[in-house]
Amino acid sequence: MIQHELIARVREKCRADEGIGAALMYGSFAAGEGDAHSDVEFWLFFDPPRRAALDPERWCRDIAPVNLLLRNEFGTHVALFPGPVRGEFHFATTGDIASVADWPARGAAVERMVVVDRDGLLTPVLRSLPERPRLPAAPDEIADLCGRFANWLVLALHVTARGERLRAQDALSHAARHLLWMARLAEHSTDHWLTPSRAAEAELPARTVEAVDRRSPTDDSPGAYARALWTEGRRHWRTLLARIERPEPAALFAELDALTARHESNGAAGSGR
């Protein structure tokens, strides 16, 4: 895979560049899960003067030809190498190493992550992190997770009724993500918690995957999709409520039953079914 070649070149460049105080690899390849569709992902901690003089595009072009370099909405530089293969690069300074302690988890073994640690500052910070993120465990945390699913679903239903289909789709994508978190918690399948859609087809029940997959409903209206999400979300919500020994919000459940059924029916009528 070209990704292995890119990773080897990044490692070699980091070790040769004395201006890099520390560097780490994260993501799928660090976790041993990378495949031909995976990104290559690095944090690079430069000495401040070296970082100030750095040209990120030139740095990436020393690794391989770059078809496009951009900064995403999180401020990360993304290089689109031939393939196209995505490379994510955080060009930081050694003063930013301490901020790694704020990560929810590291996602891989320290030894697989550390590329360079010239002053020994990065390794202990990584070791202080859990390999897996902390999961909702307290009853209030679990109840809030389920409540967030309902929050996005209710918003989606209201804006659908207003005729804002694009806004409804946006809200439904948030509802779907929270449904996947609920399903992972209910099914004790939390290996990919931070990205709950990752490997969902292999790790979650087929009915959950079908509900979240927009292509599954025979009617692709927002109302039909909301109904599919609610039917499956209610099932996982009840499982989690039983686990934390809390009653279901019966009035809300009844309202969502009626509202999603009505929206599904309206969508079917509008599609000529």
Image: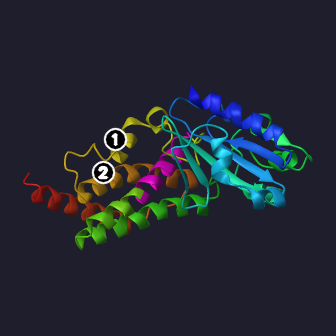
Q: Quadrant of residue 32?
A: top right
- Residue shown at 51% from the left, 50% from the top: 181
- Residue shown at 36% from the left, 68% from the top: 154
Query: Where residue 204 appears, x then y in whole percent?
Result: 46, 38
Question: 10 Å neighbourhood of mark 1: few (<14), some, or many (≥20)?
Answer: some
Residue 210 is tagged as 1
Q: Quadrant of residue 123?
A: top right
State the extent of the magenta-drawn residues as a range.
174-189
Closest to the observer: 212 or 41?
Answer: 41
The answer to the question of whether label 2 and label 1 lie on touching residues, with beta carbons closer than 8 A, is yes
Query: Where residue 203 appears, x then y in whole percent?
Result: 49, 35
| 63 to the left or right of 129 | left
Of all residues shown, which one is farthest toward the top?
Answer: 1
Of all residues shown, which one is farthest toward the right?
Answer: 119
Q: Is residue 183 magenta?
A: yes
| Distance from Cα at disc 2 to Cα at disc 1 | 9 Å
Q: Is residue 91 magenta?
A: no
Is residue 33 visible in the rendered image? The answer is no
- Label 2: which residue? 228
The three-letter amino acid code for the residue at tag 2 is: Ala
| 110 to the left or right of 63 | right
